Amino acid sequence: MMTGSNLERVLKEGHFAVTAEIGPPKSCNAAFVQRKADLLKGYADVFNITDNQTAIVRMSSIAAAVLIQQKGLEPVIQMTCRDRNRIGLQSDLLGAAALGIKNVLCLTGDHQSFGNHPQAKNVFDLDSIQLIKTIKDMRDEGRFLCGEEMKVRPDVFIGCVENPFADPFEFRALRLQKKIEAGADFVQTQCVLDMKHFRHFMDLINDRGLTDRVAVLAGVMPIKSARMARYMQKNVAGMMVPDELCERLETAADVQKEAVDIVVEQIAEVKEIPGVRGVHIMAVAWEEVVPEIVRRAGLYPRPF
Amino acid sequence: MIVGELKPFTEIKKMIRGYQRILVAGCGGCVTVCQTGGLQEAETLARLLNMDDPGTTVESLAVPRQCEWEFLEQLKTTVQRCEIIVSTACGIGVQAMNEYFREIQTLPALNTRFLGMPVEHGVFVERCQACGECMLHLTGGICPVARCSKSLMNGPCGGSKNGRCEISPEIDCAWQLIYERLKALDQLERLLVLQPPKDWSHSRDGGVRKMVREDLMLDDGE
């Protein structure tokens, strides 16, 4: 299968992939997205555009994706199941494919209670696994979820996420297997801060032969301040932040430099773990640091 | 059972402003069990309304179930003396009253919360969402529709931690419960089955639902 996705090509040709995240603005400011695109161009193979992350209203993923596409970057649109039912999701996928988008990442979506409209009615008509299967059937069978056929199929490279740090831990590998069976081509993990735990997860999925069936991109995140690390340690569900990491940031003379050092070390470590075929850099609200990380990790220039 | 919770007193007061002769109608069904809308609670509410405005006449009564026409008949004579009815039944009872007593309005004194049960004295938890297509045989007897915050069919999501849901430490992660239950039943393989999208047309999404039992219907007009 060749979807024309740059990420697919990079992986297929055996390169260590780099993906990065761009968060759209809480406004209709196209220049904001364009500025980030200019900043990051060439530093990753594809760029995830988040979909109203943490349930906060932002510019739509597809619209921001088109803006970066116009700047010559290849986007991955993120699609969550929180805000659209199966009609909306399939329709938006067709629209995205018509606009030339080649990659889609399927997620359940953060609950609306975390966002700025906690009074909203949620949808969750499909879950992320059902969305993966729906998109795969649209692409490979040319069929909508209802079974009706379509004339032109959306040729997209399908991604999913997995959180190795959530519970029940033993089930995480099996759940990833379900996502692969549903049709995921690549998986981006929750950011890896606890390396020991992540190695354990990779052992489990390697034992099940899952890394032969899906490209695993390990998530990494530069943490800008010690306070933020402590906050994440306490308050963010499904995140494991080791004490030693917090302490390193707390005692660092130059915290931001230390944050980059840590990520560069993490990339070097995950690169050596069997089955890891790339990294996904989530520099939330700190995208400008991505070029430095990619360069220092020895991953620049990108192959294509 | 249907779990209902009394509205704030100020809200009820505001609803009945201007009325002098009031009937507080309780229900002997679910809301009696959750002690929010039975005879005792209707009497208490009537007393409070009367104390708040001694100029009013407030009566209270309860029927075994407000959601059945045959019991509503018992209220007829009392209703005729009143200007307004405040029902402490669930939303079904309030609507039945409005439909039965056309000439007078029935107002809701409760917020109908959910279909659930008392898990301990005084603690009620949601258990069913009446989705119309029960799948409890697949999930170890724990409902993901009602008990997973995202109603996932293939859970758990990435927000499950220490058995709790990401949205609140007060909420159990339904999929953690399902996982543990199926593990205990030696049926974990069930979780590897990809659950297809649910047919929500059997739920509220299919419009107002109706069930007809012809075998129970009475011959009309003969």
Image (spheres, coloured by chain):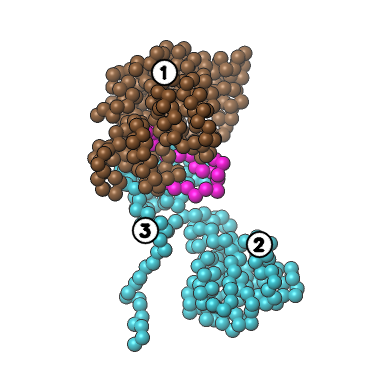
Chain colours: A brown, B cyan
**A139 to A119, vertically: above or below:** above
Residues tagged by mark 1 and mark 2 found on one chain of the structure:
no
Residue under numbered circle 2: B11
**Element under label 2?**
helix
Q: In this view, does B218 lie to the left or right of A110?
A: left
Q: Which amino acid does label 2 sit on?
A: Glu
* Number of on-image labels: 3
Percent across and percent down for residue A47 are 42, 26
The numbered mark, 2 or 3, whose residue comes first in the sequence reads 2
Residue A207 visible (yes or no): no
In the rendered structure, the residue with mark 2 lies on which chain?
B
- Above-or-below relation of A211 to B16: above
The residue to which callout 3 is attached is: B202
- Asked if the residue at tag 1 contacts the one at tag 3, i.e. Cβ–Cβ closer than 8 Å, the answer is no
**Residue density around tag 2, few if under 14, some if 14–19, many if 20 or more, within 10 Å:** few
- Give the image location of residue B73, x and y in percent: 52, 81
**Amino acid carrying mark 1 in the image:** Gly
The residue lying at 67 percent from left, 77 percent from top is B21
Image coords of residue A251 (percent x, y): 62, 16
Query: Quick one: quadrant of the C terminus of chain A?
Result: top left
Circle 3 sits in a helix, a strand or a loop, which is it? Answer: helix
Residue found at the far right of this picture: B54
Q: Distance between the residues labelled 1 and 2?
A: 60 Å
